[in-house]
Image (spheres, rainbow, N blue to C red):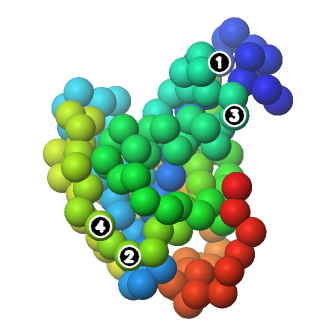
Amino acid sequence: MPLRDVPSRDKAPGAGILPFAASTGRVLLGERSHYCADPYTWAGFGGSAEPEDRSPVDTALREFVEETGYHGPVDLVASGVVRRGPTVSHVFVGIVPVEFEPTLNDEHIMALWLEPMTLNPAALHWTAREFLRVLPSPYLTDLGRRRRTPRSSF
């Protein structure tokens, strides 16, 4: 459904990226600051749609740049939609070539590159926890190797 057609009872749909480094297979998560809902949980990078966003992909990429300062290549290779109450969020796996040092805005306290299979679900923001729950484990452990072969991107 186009963003403009989301029922008014729903909050503006959100979108975000869980970035994985092709070189290591590790995921970058940020610890949310006290300025955000669900502070001190670990999450990918995303937020609500803005009027100029034409799609969830636009929202996810814009938010990723705003929150990490990253301007390099990112290949969106998997996605899912998670919902909690009136909140709808499109979550994408974004493959970046190598780990980078993010320049965080005030929405995150810190960021770490982590092995996906070592994440504590209780410490994750609900969007990351739900998305990782439905993404098959073999896919997570093989992300780095999969990206060495070109894949279609958005």
Q: Residue at x 70, y 55 (%)?
A: 154
Q: CA distance from mark 2 to mark 1?
A: 36 Å
Residue type at tag 3: Ser
Where is residue 130? Give x, y as percent. Answer: 55, 54
> Few, some or many C-alpha atoms within 10 Å of disc 3 (few <14, some 14-19, many ≥20)?
some
Nearer the N terminus, badge 4 or badge 1?
Answer: 1
Where is residue 143? Give x, y as percent. Answer: 55, 81
Please state which of residues 79 and 119 is positioned toward the viewer in this rendering: 79
Q: In the structure shown, which secondary structural element does the residue marked by tag 3 occupy?
A: loop
Nearer the N terminus, badge 2 or badge 3?
Answer: 3
Q: CA distance from mark 3 to mark 4?
A: 26 Å
Q: In the structure shown, which secondary structural element does the residue marked by tag 4 occupy?
A: loop
Instruction: Specify the farthest residue to the right.
Output: 1
Q: Are marks 4 and 1 in contact (CB under 8 Å)?
A: no
Quadrant where the N terminus lies? top right
> Few, some or many C-alpha atoms within 10 Å of disc 4 (few <14, some 14-19, many ≥20)?
few
Where is residue 4? Give x, y as percent. Answer: 74, 17
Q: In the structure shown, which secondary structural element does the residue marked by tag 1 occupy?
A: loop
Q: Residue at x 33, y 42 (%)?
A: 67
Label 3, on which residue?
55
Label 2, on which residue?
98
Label 1, on which residue?
10
| 131 up-or-down from 45: above or below | below
> Which mark is drawn over residue 100?
4
Q: Is residue 134 left or right of residue 102?
A: right
Q: Is residue 67 left or right of residue 5?
A: left
